[in-house]
């Protein structure tokens, strides 16, 4: 009887191109147009500043709970930039920057986290799914979308985002397994931001990397420096191209960091140290692109300021639009919209009951 | 007696039971170092260590499935599912195993576990963080389904749940978590599972409710008493399954009129079972149709509209008045 090593190869790699000092590995540097590089930079800045502004609004009570993205701009944008508009994007709840890149208006995101279901509306022509709050549940949808694309013989790809914590859920394993079995054109982008609320990555899984989980399902997997937008883009582009060409799914682990709180309801001081945050602050994804673009002569300090102030102006306008729209959404009866194509009788009755109640409640308030 | 919030009272129940019985183990997402996202398990890990207060990976099915195994071994796992909106991932373990193992093994193996989870709206939370789906569990044979309404009964019921030899689903109304304080005695206090509570004595109408809705119902009862001279009797169910209907039936026979209040959707909701019991056992005493004041049959709206979704004192007052005006 034999007792021999199994023929399992490990093609796993770690990819980094642009380091913390802004220095680039010229052998690996992708040949990206100035236009794309600057667009990536603009969206990273927009994503960061929008996030910071949302945090202020939340603290002022003008927004509800949301999940900040600070530190994860490169992971999200590098990945989503590899998609074509005809491809699918399946987010979890922390993909603000990716959503903006894909065309979701800022005011929709504000409306959603402001407590209005209308914020979930996906603009016509944009092939994104809405925010998925139940962790890992959305991965299977990306596999289903990709399977359908394959069935229809279209060359569309589905990319889905999730965190390190999500890799512990059954849905994650079922999604990777199905994607590999059916060779669906799916790109799994795991944003390993080191924490799932208070649970560190080391307590989430015994695996030394998340990327190696791809091995078990026999699909290409790799780890990238998630704070390096060039590396993330390169990995994602390869994965998308392979998927489009019929080469099946890929699993990408972006090693990054959630610099802010888990959500605005969370206090990270309870479970992690300031030193850790400071260490990752030095690895900030935006600072390094700035150095890179400046060294290439594509970005002057004045242009940096201009990008920031353009972003701020766009954010301010979006907030105004959000507040205007929110005023028109005061009618609670709108909660009855969009449950069925045709509203069933019992809902018509319940809506009428609420309408009458609100009407007389308002009258009473007027007389009081 | 110290005045406590429901969060503190639940924490005390866990701490005291863990001190008394080393079979009691707490497990779940963020229950250890973080003390739970609502702080119900705050400080337990410092006192009992990471072997008894276990920060698990993010996997509800695993948390519950593992609790079943621990319980079969003879431990007393108290697992936390961070929000009831994520308990669907463990639903299968509860339905297919926790609720059945005693019967399937014909008494050889039992599952003395508790599943604690916050439910319900009213705290401006995200999607899936506000729904009220207790009926899924109340409907399931082989389970006990408990919902406290205040700090003191929450503590007493949790102690009973931990000591119960069968699986108990323990829904915590998160709108009540920090809404008010009550005196909670340091000394041991338990409440029987399966008994409802007369929360207010009255004679004109019976209001039946539980969980977070107990407060608006009591508020409505006070208003009716003060402004209209109507004295409602209020029953706080505390346990949805097994449902002991003695008190309900007695009260309905006395008042002849009943209004049921819950935040869960109306259709096939807990109210439907209550109406059925009353019709079966008190039909000839009823002087008006039984009314339900409930959540609508909708996906719980995001928080900008949750107030309009949730039953409030005004809606309850009106339903009571209509019930009193209705002739049988
Ligand atoms: C199925 C499920 N269980 C629990 C939660 C509560 N919850 C929200 S986010 C989170 C941690 C997620 O961690 P990770 O997957 O690493 O993503 P990150 O938040 O770090 O981006 C938890 C436990 C949830 N949303 N869904």
Image: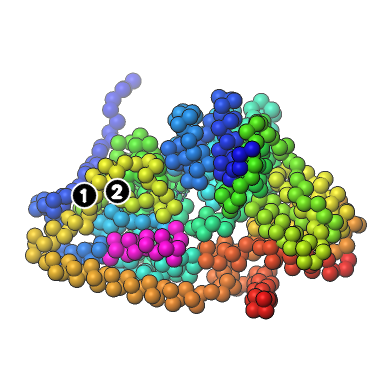
Query: Residue A25 placed where, x, y %?
Result: 11, 51
Mark 1 within 8 Å of ligand 1, using the beta carbon: no
Q: How is the image coloured?
A: rainbow
Residue B23 seen: no
Q: Which mark is residue B308?
A: none
User: With respect to residue B190, does A124 lie above or below?
Assistant: below
Query: Residue A178 placed where, x, y %?
Result: 41, 48
SS label for mark 2: loop
Write down the residue under mark 2: A257
Residue B137 relative to residue B200: left or right: left
- In the image, residue A54 lies in the stretch drawn in magenta: yes
Which residue is at 66% across, 74% downward? A361
Which residue is at 45% across, 47% downward? A171
Question: Total label count?
Answer: 2
SS label for mark 1: loop
Dot 1 alpha-carbon crowd within 10 angstroms: few under 14, some 14 to 19, many 20 or more: many
Residue B21 relative to residue A242: left or right: right
Q: Chain of mark 2?
A: A
Magenta span: predominant SS is helix
Residue most extreme to the right: B284
Residue A3 relative to residue B274: left or right: left
Residue A197 relative to residue B251: left or right: left
Residue most extreme to the top: A1
- Labels 1 & 2 near each other (Cβ < 8 A): yes
- Start and end of the magenta stretch? A46-65
Image quarter of residue A288: bottom left
Which quarter of the rendering shows the N terminus of chain A?
Answer: top left
Query: Residue A319 placed where, x, y %?
Result: 38, 72
Q: Earlier in the sequence, mark 1 or mark 2?
A: 2
Q: Chain of mark 1?
A: A
For the residue pair A21 and B269, the one nearer the viewer reads as A21
């Amino acid at each position: 009887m034999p007792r021999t090593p199994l023929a399992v190869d490990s093609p796993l790699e770690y990819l980094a191109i642009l380091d913390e000092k802004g220095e680039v590995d010229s052998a690996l540097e992708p040949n990206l147009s100035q236009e794309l590089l600057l667009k990536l930079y603009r969206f990273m800045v927009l994503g960061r500043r929008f996030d910071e502004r949302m945090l202020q609004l939340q603290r002022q009570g003008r927004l509800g709970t949301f999940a900040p993205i600070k530190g994860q701009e490169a992971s999200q944008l590098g990945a989503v930039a590899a998609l074509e508009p005809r491809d699918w994007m399946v987010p979890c709840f922390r993909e603000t920057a990716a959503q903006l890149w894909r065309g979701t208006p800022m005011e929709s995101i504000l409306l959603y986290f402001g407590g209005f279901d209308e914020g979930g509306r996906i603009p016509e022509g944009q092939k994104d799914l809405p925010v998925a709050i139940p962790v890992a549940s959305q991965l299977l949808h990306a596999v289903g979308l990709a399977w359908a694309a394959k069935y229809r013989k279209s060359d569309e790809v589905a990319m889905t985002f999730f965190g390190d914590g999500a890799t512990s859920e059954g849905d994650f394993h079922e999604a990777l397994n199905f994607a590999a079995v059916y060779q669906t054109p799916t790109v799994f982008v795991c944003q390993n931001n080191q924490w799932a609320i208070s649970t560190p990555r080391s307590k989430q899984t015994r695996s030394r990397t998340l990327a190696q989980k791809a091995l078990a399902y026999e699909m290409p997997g790799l780890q990238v420096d998630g704070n390096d937008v060039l590396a993330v883009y390169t990995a994602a582009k390869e994965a998308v191209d392979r998927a489009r060409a019929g080469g099946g799914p890929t699993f990408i682990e972006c090693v990054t960091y959630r610099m802010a709180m888990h959500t605005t309801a969370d206090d990270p001081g309870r479970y992690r140290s300031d030193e850790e945050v400071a260490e990752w602050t030095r690895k900030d994804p935006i600072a390094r692109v700035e150095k890179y673009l400046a060294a290439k002569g594509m970005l002057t300090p004045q242009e940096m300021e201009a990008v920031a102030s353009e972003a701020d102006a766009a954010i301010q306008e979006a907030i105004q639009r959000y507040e205007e729209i929110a005023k028109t959404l005061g009618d609670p009866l709108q909660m009855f919209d969009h449950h069925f194509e045709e509203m069933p009788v019992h809902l018509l009755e319940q809506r009428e009951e609420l309408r009458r109640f609100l009407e007389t409640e308002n009258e009473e308030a007027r007389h009081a | 007696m110290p005045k406590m919030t429901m969060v503190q009272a639940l924490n005390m129940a866990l701490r005291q039971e863990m001190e008394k019985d080393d079979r009691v183990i707490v497990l779940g997402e963020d229950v250890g170092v973080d003390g739970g996202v609502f702080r119900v398990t705050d400080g337990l890990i410092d006192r009992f260590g990471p072997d008894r207060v276990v920060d698990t990976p993010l996997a509800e099915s695993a948390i519950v499935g593992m609790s079943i195994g621990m319980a079969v071994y003879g431990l007393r796992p108290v697992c936390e599912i961070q929000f009831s909106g994520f308990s669907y991932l463990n639903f299968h373990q509860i339905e297919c195993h926790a609720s059945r193992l005693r019967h399937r093994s014909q008494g050889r193996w039992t599952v003395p576990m508790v599943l604690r989870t916050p439910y319900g709206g009213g705290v401006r939370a995200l999607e899936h963080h506000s729904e009220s789906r207790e009926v899924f569990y109340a409907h399931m044979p082989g389970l006990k389904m408990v919902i406290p309404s205040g700090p003191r009964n929450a503590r007493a019921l949790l102690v009973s749940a931990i000591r119960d030899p069968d699986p108990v689903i323990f829904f915590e109304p998160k709108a009540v978590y920090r809404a008010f304080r009550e005196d909670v005695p340091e000394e041991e206090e338990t409440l029987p599972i399966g008994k409802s509570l007369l929360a207010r004595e009255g004679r004109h109408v019976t209001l039946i409710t539980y969980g977070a809705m107990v407060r608006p119902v009591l508020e409505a009862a006070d208003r009716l008493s003060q402004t209209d001279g109507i004295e409602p009797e209020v029953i706080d169910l505390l346990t949805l399954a097994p449902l002991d209907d003695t008190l309900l039936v007695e009260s309905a026979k006395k008042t002849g009129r009943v209004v049921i209040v819950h935040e869960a959707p109306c259709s096939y909701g807990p109210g439907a079972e209550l109406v059925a019991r009353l019709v079966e056992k008190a039909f000839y005493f009823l002087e008006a149709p039984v009314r339900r004041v409930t959540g609508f049959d909708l996906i719980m709206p995001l928080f900008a509209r949750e107030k309009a979704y949730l039953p409030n004192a005004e809606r309850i007052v009106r339903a009571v008045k209509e019930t009193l005006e209705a002739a049988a």
